[in-house]
Image (spheres, grey):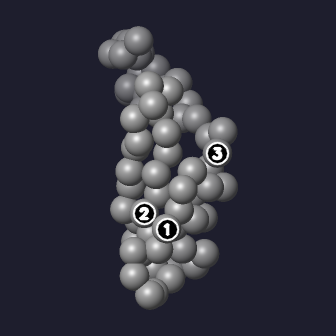
C-alpha cells in the first residue's frame, strides 16, 4: 500500500492499494483521535462472521451467497 499525507497535519491520509486487476483503489482517510487512519492496518486478515443478525425464534434465511 502507498500511504501519503494529504496536508501538514497527522489526521488526513491517502491510501492506495493495487487490486488484482492492476487498478489502484484509493481511500482518503481522516481522523482526529488515537493512532490515526493507519490504525486500520491492524485489521488485516479480519473477516466478518457468516451471520451477523439472528431472527427471533432462531429461524434464519440465507440472503447472500
Residue highlighted by disc 2: 14
In the rendered view, would you say 60 is above or below 36?
above
Q: CA distance from mark 3 to mark 2?
A: 18 Å
Q: Position of residue 45 (x, y in %)?
A: 66, 39
Q: Are marks 3 and 2 in contact (CB under 8 Å)?
A: no
Q: Position of residue 29 (x, y in %)?
A: 41, 65
Real-space Cα distance between discs 1 and 2?
Answer: 5 Å
Indicate which disc residue 4 carries.
1
What separation in Å lies between label 1 and label 3 (alpha carbons)? 19 Å
Secondary-structure class at tag 1: strand
- Residue 44: assigned label: 3
Q: Which mark is residue 22?
A: none
Does residue 40 appear anywhere in the picture?
yes
Q: Residue at x 38, y 50 (%)?
A: 26
The mark lying in front, picked from 1 and 3, is: 1
Dot 3 or dot 2: first in sequence order is 2
* Residue positioned 62% across, 40% down in the render: 46
Could you tell me if the residues under marks 1 and 2 are in contact, i.e. CB atoms within 8 Å? yes
Quadrant in the rendering for residue 27: bottom left
User: How many C-alpha atoms fall within 10 Å of the one at disc 2: few (<14), some, or many (≥20)?
Assistant: some
Quadrant housing the C terminus: top left
Amino acid at each position: 500500500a502507498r500511504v501519503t499525507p494529504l496536508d501538514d497535519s497527522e489526521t488526513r491520509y491517502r491510501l492506495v492499494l493495487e487490486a488484482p486487476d492492476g487498478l489502484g483503489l484509493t481511500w482518503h482517510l481522516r481522523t482526529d483521535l488515537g493512532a490515526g487512519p493507519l490504525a486500520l492496518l491492524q485489521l488485516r486478515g479480519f473477516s466478518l462472521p457468516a451471520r451477523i443478525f439472528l431472527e427471533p425464534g432462531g429461524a434464519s434465511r440465507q440472503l447472500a451467497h
